[in-house]
Image (cartoon, helix red, strand yellow):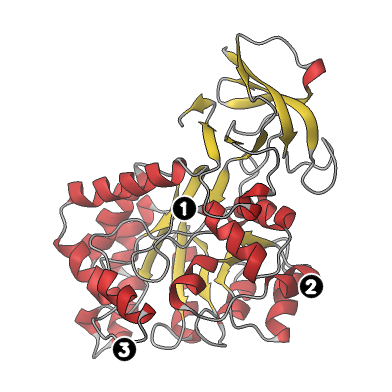
């Protein structure tokens, strides 16, 4: 057993109201003791037990490691030209997701893994200690399975998204592609995944197709999540609640009935908001205030992908959520940590409490509020993941 005490913490966010002030469980002048890969003790610094080694936080803030519960990191290529055209007000028709599908299919396993690791390192340096990632850029049995196999070597939170779009190979027969996704492809992919997801949207999969895909995934032992109501009003949110999905992700276009459904299902289905997508597409912002005030559980995530949200920065998404989605700094931080843990149905991450996994980030700032107050500034100066200092 090896213990490390992080001492002289100016402001500690625990996300446990029993340990400190308010919903964030704030503790001033705090200390945290890590034993191997777990949090062993949390409290006032002057009461901290002895430890084998000590780290001096010099009065700075410590927060739980970010939990990024929605990303698409197994891909090749980028879509710079598409983004440049969109930001320049020009129409662009190079194929969107299909462009990434072509590049991903052409890439080797080593190239895909190297790209994944580069993005993971980038995210870790910004405080992310848990991430979920999906397939969805292969859209063949072999390419979807290899994407999940590569991802599963680096995270336990792996999502089968064969239903990202209808494969270009089946453009004339979407029903046959749904049969593939719910049959041979699912059989090949399920051993590597924990979750099943579907893009329920006009131009992708309608409500009936999405229900069939999620139901088949659940029968294979995978837990549903849904890309819901991103581009337009539709059945995605209601389907997520009906099937007790862990999360309904995007939630940009919501009716009053959708908001009510998410509020009623707050203990089961998390509304995961992805402001990087709206920033990168100049689209309508999700109304986080409306969801929170109704009683829904809200998470924040990056949606890191090469087309519509090419950012791995949870601090950036927090700043966007505070500025443009009307969240308070406290709400945004909770949603990026504890909220993400809820979306992954985890109780061992997203909080700094005894028994939790020792995932923490030290900010070069006196308070977590600086994440929104100083947008774009690299405030994360140290990261502990599973008890080891990795940044």
Residue 170, percent across and down? 23, 83
Residue labelled with disc 1 = 132
Distance between mark 1 and mark 2 Cα atoms = 27 Å
Which disc, if any, is residue 369?
Answer: none
Q: Nearer the viewer, residue 89 or 122?
A: 89
Q: Is residue 326 visible?
A: yes
Location of residue 193 by image quarter: bottom left
Which disc, if any, is residue 91?
Answer: 3
On the rendered structure, is 150 left or right of 10? left
Number of marks: 3
On the rendered structure, is 294 left or right of 116? right
Q: Split into 4 quadrants, where in the image is the N terminus?
A: top right
* Mark 3 or 1: the one toward you: 3
Mark found first going from the N terminus, 3 or 2: 3
Which disc, if any, is residue 294?
Answer: 2
Residue 289, percent across and down? 73, 71
Residue at image location 56% in from the left, 81% down from the top: 284
Mark found first going from the N terminus, 3 or 1: 3
User: Element type at marker 1?
Assistant: strand
Residue at image location 57% in from the left, 46% down from the top: 66
Mark found first going from the N terminus, 1 or 2: 1
Residue 381 to residue 6: above or below: below
């Amino acid at each position: 057993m090896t213990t490390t005490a992080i001492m002289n913490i100016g402001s500690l966010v625990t996300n446990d109201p029993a340990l400190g002030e308010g919903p964030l469980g704030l503790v001033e002048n705090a200390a945290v003791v890590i034993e191997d890969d777990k949090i062993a003790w949390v409290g006032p610094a002057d009461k901290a037990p002895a430890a084998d080694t000590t780290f001096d936080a010099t009065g700075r803030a410590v927060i739980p490691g970010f939990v990024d519960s929605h990303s698409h990191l197994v891909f090749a290529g980028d879509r710079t030209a598409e983004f440049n055209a969109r930001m320049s007000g020009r129409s662009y028709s190079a194929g969107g997701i299909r462009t990434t599908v072509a590049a991903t299919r052409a890439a080797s396993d080593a190239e895909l893994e190297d790209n994944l690791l580069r993005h993971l390192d980038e995210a870790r340096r910004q405080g992310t200690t848990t991430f979920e990632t999906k397939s969805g850029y292969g859209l063949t049995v072999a390419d979807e399975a290899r994407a999940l196999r590569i991802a599963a070597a680096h995270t336990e939170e792996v999502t089968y998204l064969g239903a990202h779009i209808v494969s270009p190979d089946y453009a004339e027969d979407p029903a046959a592609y749904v049969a593939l996704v719910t049959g041979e492809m699912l059989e090949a992919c399920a051993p590597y995944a924990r979750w099943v997801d579907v893009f329920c949207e006009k131009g992708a999969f309608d409500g009936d197709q999405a229900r069939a895909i999620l139901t088949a995934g659940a029968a294979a032992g995978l837990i549903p999540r849904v890309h819901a109501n991103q581009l337009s009003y539709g059945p995605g949110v209601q389907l997520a609640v009906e099937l007790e999905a862990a999360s309904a992700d995007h939630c940009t276009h919501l009716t009053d009935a959708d908001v009510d459904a998410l509020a009623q299902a707050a203990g089961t289905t998390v509304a995961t908001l992805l402001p990087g997508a709206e920033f990168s597409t100049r689209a309508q912002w999700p109304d986080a205030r409306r969801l929170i005030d109704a009683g829904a559980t809200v998470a924040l995530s990056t949606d890191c992908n090469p087309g519509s949200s090419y950012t791995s920065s949870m601090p950036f998404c927090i700043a966007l959520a505070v500025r443009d989605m009307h969240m308070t700094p406290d709400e945004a931080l909770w949603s990026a940590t504890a909220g993400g843990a809820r979306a992954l149905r985890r109780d061992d991450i997203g909080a700094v409490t005894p028994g939790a996994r020792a995932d923490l980030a030290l900010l070069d700032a006196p308070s977590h509020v600086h994440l929104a107050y100083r947008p774009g500034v690299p405030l994360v100066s140290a990261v502990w993941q599973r008890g080891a200092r990795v940044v």
